């Protein structure tokens, strides 16, 4: 790759099969631009995707990528980054993928603080399986499996992240292209686990959480003068269930990522041709 | 008296049984004696009967037998549990000063040693087990000085005072027995040799093999009896630039390992029982994305939580068939502790050469059993690493299509495609569990589907041709009776040959470390009048696949009590089986 990386270099020649108007187009464009803008190139980037409409993203982007099984994208990304500190790792998936089947991994990925970026395309519905409730669906939202609503409060992913000790928590809106790209960029540049929940509307199955709805209600935390290093203020924003917002909500400026804490600096793909030179010492331990 | 000495210490979990046993085992090994250890333990941390048994001889020992010559009993239960293994000449060391009154069968030699008081005299009651070791030395004529080195190894980190006190405790135990008992009638005089042996168990051998093979990444979730692999690697793998991570569960562990493997690191996970179930979904992903990964299953008694601290070989079907769809894979099952080392290395090579999951199937008995070997058994100079068709910046060009895209799943003749890892210029590509074309792009095109399924199947065929899927053979090659075994039964089986020979029963034994692909035994089966398949499970999972391969009915010896086979017992079982009719 030449040093002049353009965001289109991150595009694959596969045409997305997303429904026209799907929020995931905007989410993906922002990710590609942010990657290019932060000086990465496809040969040094690894994208891990989950299962769902959102999970198809790895197919439409060009880089090293893995499209795994439902809910397990974060562990895969964790393995890639630990083994290869030299590689830029980005994990992407849906709200079902991340907060339902993968919820356990989410909490632990947050607290592990591996230096990677996690983008959740939150459409508050299951898209690929055609319109069932997701963990972020509103309690009165009617779907094929919940005709009278879920009658449960939606999960609050930011609260989960904050409680788990997150060092970077943000939210963006896929159709606010510039802000979305900027926020992803900040997540990439963050030293540690950069978590961005992206409002990425499903135009086919969700007629409540629409582009119009977000446009009308969205508050930009930057305009509000919010200081992301202010933990208490972040807490207040996160616990305010009635507010839709975008921006960096919380960033710990003293974040020390996992790799640094554990001294992971080496490229683990590099191994000798035979056993290590002092390997007989391993045997002698058993005298 | 036989040179073959069987010694045990037993008490409650938390009594330091394990470390005491290990100190004695190491001392014997340092004295140039062969050692084979086994453990009885329950699934609880404190309380509950636990024992550490040692069989030692100047000759090689490969299994346990039903005999105990010297027993250090810290509780009555220790005596009761082992009554059927004790015999007239057995000596039982116990502490008569303690609150329990030992009920020792009359015909045995009761050796009452004030373990606690002597330990206190040496510096602390905690050393009472070491006093017992000293007493055992007195009975067997084993020089107490051999204990010193193991005591240093065990307690060196705690300072020289502690080491000195322990040495003193052992001497007080020895002297007490010399002064108060005349045990000449027991007639021991343990021989020593100049041999330098190493003493290790199956899980340690797997961990050591992994490091020798260049494993750099291990992700796991604790579960008996696999955890000690993780514990071995922790603190050692770092010396070689690697890392161990304790994942939040097995789903995560196998996916982390997969991520590291995809990124180019030699990577492994290990688990048992329920953990293997949880990992199953990812088996298919590993195979479909053609990622090299070693997955170790240290089997224990199932199903469900079954008997977590007990032996079984019940997961063979899981390893062979686990996962939805048809998953190309290799299944390798070491048959001895030294094979745990060599087969682990082979597993890493197979995984990278053929870009598939490799299941390394071991079992509880192998994982907790320690055995002596000459250090050359683990000759590191003989370790070979084969990374398969890994491309670099220079060779990647051969594999680009006319638009410059990397053909990560190129349908080559041998079925093996090139592999590029992140950082390789122009090697970027998508890996996926979805069916895909040569470039890794999703497809449902019927022709491409068939091409890719055939390609993946073909690499297993290639491996079948290129690799040596051997078995090992023991006994009389011309015997009419053929015994087949897999996993850790080999040791007991080979020793059973001695018992059988003494009664003029001759058999031929095949020990098979490869489950899939596996050697074709059709001819061997045809030559034999009787075929008996020996395994620690109730249904005969290996017997089933061999019957299927050879279209021959076999007899089966199945043990599923939770306890491994013993040599003498197995000899009896074989004799009985030989008399039975072949099943219709
Ligand atoms: C283990 C497993 N269970 C269920 C599924 C079926 N499945 C595919 S995608 C999906 C939900 C996806 O929802 P979300 O993550 O919100 O993504 P979206 O399609 O909305 O982008 C489910 C349940 C699966 N692939 N694997
Ligand atoms: S179903 Fe919804 S989420 Fe899926 S592609 Fe269509 S619009 Fe996007």
Image (spheres, coloured by chain):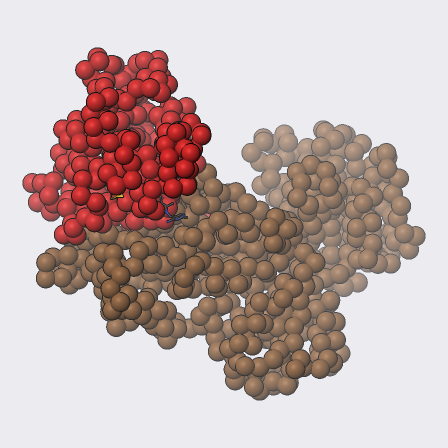
Residue occupying image coordinates x 36% and y 54%: B285
**Residue A262 visible:** no
**Residue A41 visible:** yes
Above or below B584: residue B133: above
Residue occupying image coordinates x 23% and y 19%: A219
Q: Colour of chain B?
A: brown
Q: Which residue is situated farthest in the front direction here?
A: A148
Left or right of A98 in this view: B251: right
Residue occupying image coordinates x 41% and y 41%: A145
Residue B42 in percent (x, y) is at 68, 45
Above or below B429: residue B411: below
In this view of the protein, which residue sits in the foreground, A12 or B99? A12
Check the picture and name the quadrant holding the N terminus of chain B. Answer: bottom right
Where is residue B364, by image quadrant? bottom right
Residue occupying image coordinates x 87% and y 51%: B109
Residue B409 in percent (x, y) is at 25, 61
Q: Quadrant of ligand 2?
A: top left
Residue B91 in percent (x, y) is at 83, 52
In this view of the protein, which residue sits in the foreground, B396 or B475? B396
In this view of the protein, which residue sits in the foreground, B217 or A60? A60
Residue A95 in percent (x, y) is at 34, 36
Q: Colour of chain A?
A: red
Check the picture and name the quadrant holding the C terminus of chain B. Answer: bottom right
In this view of the protein, which residue sits in the foreground, B268 or B450? B450
């Amino acid at each position: 790759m030449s040093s002049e990386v353009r965001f289109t270099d991150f595009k694959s020649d596969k045409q997305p099969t997303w429904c026209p108007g799907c929020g995931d187009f905007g989410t993906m464009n922002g990710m590609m631009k942010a990657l290019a803008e932060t000086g990465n190139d496809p040969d040094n980037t690894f994208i891990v995707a989950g299962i769902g409409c959102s999970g198809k993203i790895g197919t439409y982007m060009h880089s090293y990528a893995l499209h795994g099984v439902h809910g397990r994208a974060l562990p895969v990304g964790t393995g890639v980054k630990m083994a290869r500190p030299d590689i830029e790792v980005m994990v992407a998936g849906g709200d079902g993928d991340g907060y339902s089947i993968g919820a356990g991994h989410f909490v632990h990925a947050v607290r592990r603080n591996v230096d990677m970026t996690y983008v959740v395309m939150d459409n508050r519905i299951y898209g690929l399986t055609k319109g069932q409730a997701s963990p972020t669906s509103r309690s009165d939202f009617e779907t094929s499996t919940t005709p009278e609503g879920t009658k449960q409060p939606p999960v609050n992913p930011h609260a989960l992240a904050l409680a788990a000790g997150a060092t970077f928590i943000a939210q963006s809106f896929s159709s606010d292209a510039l802000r979305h790209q900027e926020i992803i960029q900040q997540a990439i540049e963050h030293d540690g686990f950069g978590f961005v929940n992206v409002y990425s509307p499903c135009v086919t199955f969700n007629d409540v959480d629409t582009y119009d709805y977000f446009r009308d209600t969205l508050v930009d935390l930057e305009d509000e003068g919010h200081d992301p290093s202010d933990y208490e203020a972040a807490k207040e924003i996160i616990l305010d269930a009635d507010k839709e917002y975008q921006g960096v909500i919380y960033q710990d400026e003293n974040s020390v990522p996992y790799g640094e804490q554990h001294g992971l600096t080496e490229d683990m793909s590099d191994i000798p041709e035979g056993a290590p030179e002092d390997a007989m010492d391993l045997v002698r331990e058993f005298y | 008296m036989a040179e073959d000495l069987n010694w045990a210490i037993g008490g409650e979990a938390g009594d330091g049984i394990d470390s005491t046993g290990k100190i004695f085992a190491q001392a014997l090994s340092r004295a140039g004696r062969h050692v084979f250890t086994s453990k009885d333990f329950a699934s609880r941390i404190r309380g509950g009967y636990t024992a550490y048994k040692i069989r030692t001889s100047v000759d090689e020992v490969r299994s346990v037998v039903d005999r105990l010559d010297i027993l250090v009993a810290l509780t009555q239960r220790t005596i009761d549990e082992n009554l059927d293994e004790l015999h007239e000449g057995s000596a039982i060391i116990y502490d008569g000063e303690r609150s329990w009154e030992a009920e020792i069968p009359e015909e045995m030699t009761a050796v009452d040693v004030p373990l606690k008081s002597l330990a206190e005299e040496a510096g602390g009651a905690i050393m009472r087990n070491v006093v017992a070791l000293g007493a055992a030395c007195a009975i067997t004529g084993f020089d107490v000085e051999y204990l010193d080195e193991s005591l240093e190894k065990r307690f060196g980190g705690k300072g020289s005072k502690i080491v000195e006190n322990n040495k003193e405790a052992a001497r007080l135990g020895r002297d007490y027995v010399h002064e108060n008992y005349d045990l000449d009638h027991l007639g021991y005089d343990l021989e020593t040799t100049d041999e330098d042996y190493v003493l290790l168990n199956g899980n340690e051998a797997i961990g050591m093999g992994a490091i020798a093979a260049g494993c750099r990444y291990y992700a796991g979730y604790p579960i008996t009896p696999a955890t000690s692999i993780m514990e071995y690697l922790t603190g050692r793998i770092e010396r070689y630039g690697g890392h161990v991570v304790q994942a939040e569960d097995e789903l995560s562990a196998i996916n982390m390992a997969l991520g590291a493997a995809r990124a180019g690191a030699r990577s492994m996970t290990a688990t048992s029982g329920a953990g293997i179930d949880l990992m199953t979904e990812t088996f298919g992903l590993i195979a479909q994305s053609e990622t090299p990964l070693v997955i170790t299953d240290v089997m224990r008694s199932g199903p469900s939580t079954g008997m977590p601290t007990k032996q079984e070989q019940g997961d063979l079907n899981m390893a062979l068939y686990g996962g939805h769809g048809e998953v190309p894979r290799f299944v390798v099952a070491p048959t001895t502790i030294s094979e745990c080392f060599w087969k682990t290395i082979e597993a890493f090579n197979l995984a990278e050469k053929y870009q598939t999951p490799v299941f390394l199937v071991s079992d509880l008995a192998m994982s907790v059993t320690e055995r002596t070997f000459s250090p050359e058994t683990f000759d590191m100079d003989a370790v070979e690493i084969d990374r398969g068709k890994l491309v670099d910046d220079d060779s990647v060009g051969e594999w680009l299509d006319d638009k410059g895209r990397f053909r990560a799943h190129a349908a080559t003749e041998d079925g093996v495609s090139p592999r590029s890892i992140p950082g390789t210029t122009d090697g970027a590509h998508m890996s996926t569990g979805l069916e895909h074309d040569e470039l890794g792009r999703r497809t449902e095109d019927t022709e491409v589907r068939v091409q890719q399924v055939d390609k993946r199947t073909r690499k297993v065929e290639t491996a079948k041709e290129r690799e040596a899927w051997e078995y090992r053979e023991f006994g009389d090659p011309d015997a009419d009776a053929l015994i087949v075994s897999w996993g850790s039964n080999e040791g007991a089986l080979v020793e059973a040959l001695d018992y059988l020979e003494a009664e003029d029963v001759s058999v031929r034994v095949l020990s098979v470390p490869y489950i899939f692909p596996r050697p074709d035994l059709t001819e061997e089966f045809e030559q034999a009048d009787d075929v008996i398949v020996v395994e620690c499970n109730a249904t005969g999972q290996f017997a089933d696949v061999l019957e299927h391969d050879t279209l021959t009915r076999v007899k089966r010896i199945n043990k599923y009590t939770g306890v491994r086979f013993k040599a003498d017992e197995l000899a009896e079982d074989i004799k009985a089986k030989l008399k039975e009719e072949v099943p219709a």
